C-alpha cells in the first residue's frame, strides 16, 4: 500500500505544485483590510479543494474578521482522531521592490517555489492536504479520523480562533493535534519543535505640536516627536542589551544545565544562525548562546518606524507625530497581560514632557511547551524517519503560534509541530520560498504520521 501511495504522489507532483501556486496567488494579507475580499475568495477556493479530495463535512465559518475553513473525515470508528491545523493568511509582502519575482505570482526557480505564503504556511499546510488526498485516492480511507481547522488570522494573533474553539470544544475534540508551521534544522535534518515563545505587539505613537512645522523657524525651539520617539526606543534596552522595562524578567523561567546542554547538542550553533541570517555578528543578552537568546530568553524588536517626510529628496519639516511598531517575544512563565501593563507604565515614565504617547495593542499570545516524550511525538519522529529518511532532532522555536496553547488548554490535546521549512526560506521576508523536495517528502511524512497514530502503537 505504501508503494501505491508513493507512486500516486510521484505521478501527481506537477499537479500538486500547480495547485499550490493557485493557492499562493491569493494575496491573503490578514493585517491589511484591503485584502479582506481576497481572503474570502481564498477560503472558498480552499473549501472547494477540500471537498474535491474527498473530505466530508466542509464549512466556511464566518468570524468578526476572516473566515475559518473546517473539514472532516470521521469514518474510522474506534480509531484515534487527529486535528490538523494550518493557516492560509500571510504576512504583508512589502517592500515589493525587494522581491526577485512578484510575491503573489509564485515562481519555481530550481528546486524552490517563491511567493508570499509559499512556506508560511500555505505550502506546509498543503502537504497535509495532499497527504489526505493520497490516502483517500489510493486506499479509499484514512487510518484515523481527521478534522481540519484552517484559519485566516494567524498572522494577526488569531483573535477569533480561541472563541471558536471554546464554542466548539465537543466538535473539535481530538486525541492529538498536528501542524506544520515550523522549521527543520537543515535540508537533511528534520526537526520536531517542542517549545514556542509567546508574542505581544504594539504600535507606539508619539505626538507633539498640532501640525508639521518649518524646521528652520522652530528647530531647536520645540521637541521633535520623531526625535522623542527615538529617545523612547533608546530606553527600551539597557547597556547589557536586556529589556529595560522594570519587572519584565520577574517571571522568566530559568532552565537548568541539563536542558541547556540538550539544546546545545541538538540545536544550531552560533555560526549556523549567523549564516542563516546572512550576517557576520550576533547581538543580544550576554551569557546565552544565540539559539538560547532566540528561544528561551525574551526579546523586544522594533519592527517598523515612521515619521516625517518619506519621499524623494529632503523636506525641512518637524513632523507632528511619529510611530513605531514593537514586537515582544515572551517565554515561560511570562503573562502577556502583565507584560502589557508593565510596558505601558514604563512608556509613561520615559515619555519626554513635551510629547504625548498613544499605545495600540495588536497581538497577545502565551508561550507553549510540548512534552517531547509524548507518544504522539514518538509517532511523529517515526514518520520523519520514513518520510525523510532521517530521525528528527528536537528544537525550540523563537516564533509564536497562538493556537498551540489554546489546544492544550481548551481541548486537552497535545500539539505535534512537524516543520518542513528550511532556515533560509526567508519566512516573513522578501523572497520567501518553499523547498519543493521538502514539500514532496513532507507529504509522505504526513501520511506516515496518520498511519503511526492509527496503528495503536502510540496510544494517547
Image: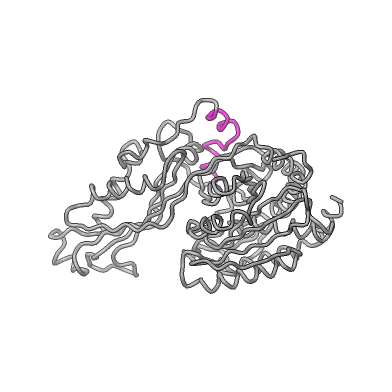
Tell me the residue at 23%/59% (across/down): 225
Magenta stretch prevailing secondary structure: helix
- Image position of 210 (left or right of 34): left
Outermost residue on the top side: it is 257
User: As rendered, which of 403 and 87 lies closer to the eye?
Assistant: 403
User: As rendered, which of 188 and 45 lies closer to the eye?
Assistant: 45
Q: Which residues are magenta?
A: 259-276
Q: How many marks?
A: 0
Tell me the residue at 45%/31% (across/down): 254
Give the x, y percent position of residue 60: 61, 68
User: As rendered, which of 324 and 457 lies closer to the eye?
Assistant: 457
In magenta segment, residue 269: yes
Give the x, y percent position of residue 397: 54, 43
Give the x, y percent position of residue 74: 74, 57
- Image position of 381 (left or right of 155): right
User: As rendered, which of 454 and 422 lies closer to the eye?
Assistant: 454
Residue 75: tell me if it is visible.
yes
- Name the quadrant containing residue 426: bottom right
Quarter of the picture containing the C terminus is: top right
Tell me the residue at 51%/42% (across/down): 274
The colouring scheme, among rainbow, by chain, secondary structure or one colour, is one colour
Residue 25: tell me if it is visible.
no
- Image position of 240 (left or right of 255): left
Tell me the residue at 62%/54% (across/down): 170
Asked if 379 appears above or below 406 in the picture, the reply is: above
- Image position of 340 (left or right of 375): left
In magenta segment, residue 396: no
Give the x, y percent position of residue 323: 32, 60
Amino acid at each position: 500500500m505504501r508503494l501505491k501511495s508513493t507512486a500516486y504522489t510521484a505521478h501527481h507532483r506537477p499537479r500538486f505544485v500547480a495547485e499550490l501556486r493557485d493557492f499562493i496567488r491569493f494575496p491573503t494579507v490578514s493585517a491589511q483590510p484591503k485584502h479582506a475580499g481576497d481572503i474570502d475568495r481564498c477560503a472558498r477556493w480552499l473549501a472547494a479543494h477540500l471537498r474535491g479530495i474527498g473530505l466530508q463535512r466542509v464549512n466556511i465559518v464566518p468570524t468578526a474578521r476572516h473566515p475559518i475553513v473546517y473539514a472532516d473525515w470521521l469514518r474510522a470508528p474506534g480509531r484515534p482522531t487527529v486535528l490538523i491545523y494550518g493557516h492560509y493568511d500571510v504576512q504583508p509582502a512589502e517592500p515589493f521592490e525587494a522581491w526577485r519575482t512578484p510575491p503573489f505570482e509564485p515562481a519555481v526557480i530550481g528546486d524552490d517555489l517563491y511567493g508570499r505564503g509559499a512556506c508560511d504556511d500555505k505550502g506546509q499546510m498543503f502537504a497535509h492536504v495532499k497527504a489526505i488526498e493520497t490516502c483517500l485516492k489510493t486506499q479509499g480511507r484514512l487510518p484515523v479520523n481527521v478534522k481540519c481547522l484552517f484559519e485566516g488570522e494567524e498572522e494577526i494573533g488569531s483573535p477569533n480562533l480561541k472563541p471558536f474553539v471554546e464554542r466548539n470544544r465537543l466538535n473539535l475534540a481530538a486525541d492529538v493535534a498536528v501542524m506544520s508551521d515550523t522549521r527543520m534544522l537543515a535540508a537533511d535534518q528534520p526537526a520536531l519543535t517542542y517549545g514556542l515563545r509567546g508574542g505581544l505587539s504594539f504600535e507606539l505613537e508619539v505626538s507633539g505640536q498640532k501640525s508639521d512645522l518649518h524646521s528652520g523657524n522652530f528647530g531647536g525651539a520645540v521637541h521633535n516627536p520623531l526625535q522623542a520617539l527615538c529617545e523612547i526606543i533608546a530606553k527600551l534596552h539597557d547597556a547589557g542589551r536586556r529589556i529595560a522595562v522594570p519587572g519584565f524578567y520577574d517571571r522568566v523561567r530559568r532552565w537548568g544545565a541539563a536542558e541547556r546542554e540538550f539544546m546545545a547538542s541538538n540545536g544550531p550553533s552560533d555560526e549556523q544562525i549567523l549564516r542563516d541570517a546572512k550576517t557576520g555578528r550576533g547581538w543580544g543578552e550576554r551569557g546565552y548562546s544565540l539559539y538560547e537568546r532566540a528561544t528561551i530568553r525574551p526579546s523586544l524588536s522594533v519592527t517598523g518606524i515612521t515619521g516625517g517626510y518619506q519621499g524623494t529628496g529632503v523636506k525641512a519639516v518637524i513632523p507632528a507625530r511619529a510611530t513605531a511598531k514593537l514586537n515582544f517575544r515572551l517565554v515561560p512563565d511570562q503573562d502577556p497581560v502583565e507584560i502589557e501593563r508593565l510596558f505601558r507604565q514604563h512608556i509613561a515614565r520615559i515619555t519626554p514632557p513635551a510629547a504625548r504617547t498613544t499605545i495600540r495593542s495588536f497581538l497577545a499570545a502565551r508561550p507553549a511547551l510540548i512534552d517531547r516524550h509524548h507518544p504522539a511525538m514518538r509517532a511523529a519522529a517515526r514518520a520523519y524517519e520514513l518520510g525523510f529518511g532521517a530521525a528528527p532532532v528536537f528544537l525550540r522555536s523563537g516564533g509564536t503560534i497562538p493556537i498551540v496553547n489554546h489546544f492544550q488548554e481548551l481541548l486537552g490535546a497535545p500539539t505535534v509541530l512537524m516543520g518542513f521549512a528550511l532556515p533560509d526560506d526567508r519566512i516573513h521576508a522578501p523572497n520567501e520560498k518553499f523547498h519543493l523536495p521538502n514539500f514532496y517528502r513532507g507529504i509522505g511524512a504526513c501520511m506516515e504520521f496518520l498511519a503511526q497514530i492509527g496503528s495503536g502503537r502510540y496510544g494517547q
